Image (tube, helix red, strand yellow):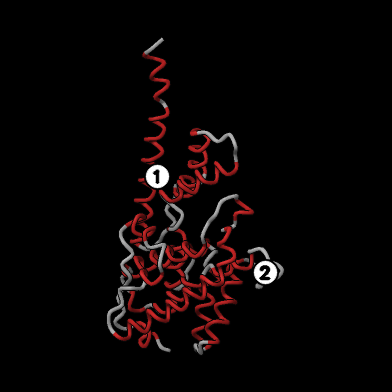
Amino acid sequence: MSEKETTAGRQPADCGSGDAGILEYAGNHEDILSCRENAEDQENTERYTAMFREVEALLAEYDKTGGKGRHKIRYSRIDHTKRVYCWMEKLYEAYPEKDSLDADALRIATIFHDCGYCAMADGAAEKLLPGEKHAAVSARLCRGYLEREGFPEETIDFICRLIAQHSDKSLLTKDIPAELLLLLEADLLDDTGLQGIVVDIWMEVAAKEDATFESIIKHIRRFTLGMMRENPMRTAKAREIWKEKRRLTEQFVKKLEEDLEMPEEFNRVLP
């Protein structure tokens, strides 16, 4: 299965614009892939849809609680996967040398990149091996799927390397394949910006019974704003998106702080 055989003529999924568009498409994977037009596109849509269904089935038990036992909140890994897929499509379409990429490998790696979280569900059939983390489990599960589907060994090895390395964000500073770069960037773009603020509020309220506006702002400053202070992205499109996410986050915190200062202004005006 060569790159030309699997990627020619493919149209990107329309995942909307900005955070709102990405979040809108966290629902149906058929919607994410619905923009394919010709026969080859339709064949690829069916392949990717089958892969999404495989991953959704693997994550079903985990997503019933979404890691709630650890964080006291429900986080859907399949929805995260769909959002990362949309970010990946945006970055791929904007990549100046996209025709040189193995787009099929990139898409498959994105679909399977977090399926290894299934090993962390209560009573999971798939178990973590000693010292193993979710990325390694994801690569192992993807390898089994691709072998059953008859993919060439060389293709499988490349896809599984992308998956196995996707959590190591230090690789953004290294000389790495462009496919891995786009997967790393797409994964980082999720749960940041305004979405990151929601996660921060979620985590602060879950951790503290007496959470306040002030403690929430501190949490946002420490986590979402803290991690967004430096722009780790390398591609122009990802840097642009990150910059806008940071601007909106800073604006939100600034406006919230101004609102919270109103009682002090009230006290100055009225005795």
- 111 to the left or right of 270: right
- Mark carried by residue 124: none
Looking at this rendering, what residue extends furthest in the right direction? 130
Callout 2 touching callout 1 (CB < 8 Å): no
| Whole-percent x, y for residue 49 in the image | 42, 76
Residue type, label 1: Thr
Please give the name of the residue rendered at 56% of the width and 58% of the height, measured from the top-left corner.
Answer: 66
- Quadrant showing the N terminus: bottom left
Please give the name of the residue rendered at 39% of the width and 48% of the height, measured from the top-left corner.
Answer: 246
Please give the name of the residue rendered at 64% of the width and 64% of the height, measured from the top-left corner.
Answer: 120
Q: Which residue is mark 2?
A: 128
| Whole-percent x, y for residue 216 in the image | 50, 38
Looking at this rendering, what residue extends furthest in the top direction? 271
Q: Judge depth for marks 2 and 1 and give the one in front.
A: 2
Residue type, label 2: Leu
Q: Which residue is mark 1?
A: 249
